[in-house]
Image (cartoon, helix red, strand yellow):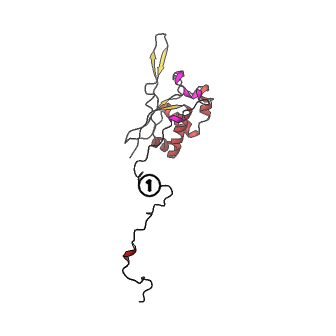
C-alpha cells in the first residue's frame, strides 16, 4: 500500500506566541511530539473574514479535520511507529490537540485532529493552558480488542498441552514391550 508523501508548506509559517512556547505543556513535549505538533499546525488553513468593526476575523476552516498519518510522519522524519504513537498521546495528554475522529477502519480512513495551540483559537478551547493542573490522559485512544483467537489463547496456569493423555492402555496388543523383545 503506497501512501502519499508528506509535503510541508515551505512558503507558509506558524507563529508561536510566548505564552505557548514557555508553557509547561509545550516544554514537557519531546522532540518528536514537537515535530508532530508543527506538522499538524502547518496543515491548518487560515482564512480572514471582514468584520463589522473594520477588523478582520481569523478562522480555521479545516481545524478538526487535520490529518498527518503515521506512515507520512515516520517516513518524513525517519522515526518508528511507536514514536508517532507516543508523540500523539503526549500531545493529547497535554491538551495541545484533540482527536475528533478515530480512523483505522480501512484503507484511506485516517484519524482527524483539532489543533488547540493556534493563535486565534478561542480561549476556552486552549486546553494546554490548564495542563499541569489538568490532563487529558483519558482521551488517549486505547487499542481495540483483539477479536481473533481470544477463545483459543493459552489460559493462565496451563501449558497449552491437553491435560489428559490420549493413548489408551489397551492399545498395546502384545504382552512384551517393544524394547524388551529380542531380534
Residue in the image at 43% along x and 25% along y? 61
**Where residue 164 appears, x then y in whole percent?**
43, 65
**Where residue 64 appears, x then y in whole percent?**
45, 29
**Where residue 88 appears, x then y in whole percent?**
52, 38
With 114 as the anchor, is 173 left or right in this view?
left
What element does badge 1 sit on?
Answer: loop
Which range of residues does the magenta coloring cover? 121-142
For disc 1, the neighbor class at 10 Å (few under 14, some 14 to 19, many from 20) is few
Closer to us: 152 or 52: 152
Q: Is residue 122 magenta?
A: yes
Q: Is residue 130 magenta?
A: yes
**What residue is shown with label 1?**
153
Residue sticking out furthest to the bottom: 183
Relative vertical location of residue 125 with respect to residue 142 in this rendering, above or below: above
**Residue 10 showing in the rendered view:** no
Closer to us: 148 or 3: 148
With 8 as the anchor, is 25 left or right in this view?
right
Amino acid at each position: 500500500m503506497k501512501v502519499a508523501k508528506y509535503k510541508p508548506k515551505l512558503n507558509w509559517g506558524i507563529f508561536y506566541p510566548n505564552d505557548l512556547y514557555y508553557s509547561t505543556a509545550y516544554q514537557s513535549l519531546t522532540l518528536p511530539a514537537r515535530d508532530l505538533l508543527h506538522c499538524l499546525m502547518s496543515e491548518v488553513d487560515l482564512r480572514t473574514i471582514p468584520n463589522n468593526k473594520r477588523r478582520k476575523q481569523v478562522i480555521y476552516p479545516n481545524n478538526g479535520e487535520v490529518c498527518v498519518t503515521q506512515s507520512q510522519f515516520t517516513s518524513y522524519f525517519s522515526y518508528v511507529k511507536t514514536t508517532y504513537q507516543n508523540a500523539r498521546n503526549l500531545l493529547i495528554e497535554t491538551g495541545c490537540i484533540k482527536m475528533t475522529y478515530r480512523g483505522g477502519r480501512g484503507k484511506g480512513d485516517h484519524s482527524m485532529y483539532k489543533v488547540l495551540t493556534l493563535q486565534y483559537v478561542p480561549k476556552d478551547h486552549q486546553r494546554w493552558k490548564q495542563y499541569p493542573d489538568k490532563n487529558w490522559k483519558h482521551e488517549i485512544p486505547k487499542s481495540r480488542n483483539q477479536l481473533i483467537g481470544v477463545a483459543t489463547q493459552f489460559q493462565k496456569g496451563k501449558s497449552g498441552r491437553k491435560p489428559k493423555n490420549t493413548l489408551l492402555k489397551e492399545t498395546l496388543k502384545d504382552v512384551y514391550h517393544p524394547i524388551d523383545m529380542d531380534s
